[in-house]
Amino acid sequence: MGFKDFMKNVAKAATSIGKVSGSSFPLGTIINLTKDEGEMAFMFTYPNKEEYIVTRDKVKSAEVLAMGVIDIKNDSKGSTMIYGTKYKVELTDGKVAILTVGLGDTLYKIESVLF
């Protein structure tokens, strides 16, 4: 991997809006916002850097699992509660994902694809 690829991967991780879990996706999969043919979409990036694009037509069903504190971050300054939303998403190819997305402007963009 060259320096350009390395920097692209670092930037993608830094701009991640959340995490994907579930047996259909490997541990460490992240979510990034993207566009597909001009439409809002999001991209799952696997730890091996493989990408999976999710558009509105790939979503079979989606539901909100939880809202509020979704994680706790511990560091040298103490504990910080992370607020956001968890979604369960079933895709048309049969894969099921649990999305954990922090609060902010990203929620309405995620929901524009899901619902």
Image: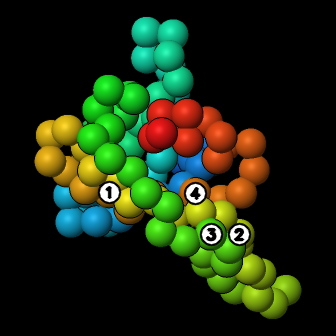
Classify mark 4: residues with Cα within 10 Å, few (<14), some (14-19) or many (20+): many
Location of residue 84 by image quarter? bottom right
Label 2 crowding class (10 Å Cα cut-off): few <14, some 14-19, many 20+? some
Q: Mark 4 and mark 3 in contact (Cβ < 8 Å)?
A: no
Residue 42 sits above or below residue 17 on the image: above
Question: Mark 3 or mark 2, which is nearer the start of the sequence?
Answer: 3
- Whole-angstrom CA distance, mark 2 to mark 4, is 9 Å
Under mark 2, the amino acid is: Tyr
Q: Is residue 67 visible?
A: yes
Q: Is residue 27 left or right of residue 16?
A: left
Tell which of 50 and 89 is nearer to you.
Answer: 89
Q: Badge 1, how many Cα within 10 Å: few under 14, some, many 20+? A: some
Find residue 106 and report its horizontal and vertical position in percent. 66, 43
Q: Earlier in the sequence, mark 2 or mark 4?
A: 2
The label shown at residue 83 is 2
| Secondary element type, mark 3 | strand
Nearest-to-viewer mark from 2 and 3: 3
Q: Quadrant of the N terminus?
A: top left
Q: Which residue is mark 3?
A: 67
10 Å neighbourhood of mark 3: few (<14), some, or many (≥20)? some
84 over 9 or under it: above or below: below
x, y (%) of residue 102?
A: 65, 59
Q: Is residue 6 visible?
A: no
For the view shown, which residue lies furthest in the right direction?
77
Mark 2 falls on what kind of element? Answer: strand
Q: Pointer 2 and pointer 4: residues touching (CB < 8 Å)?
A: no
Residue 97: give its label: 1
Q: Earlier in the sequence, mark 2 or mark 1?
A: 2
27 is higher (above) or lower (below) than 61: below
Q: Which residue is mark 4?
A: 101
Q: Residue at x 45, y 52 (%)?
A: 30
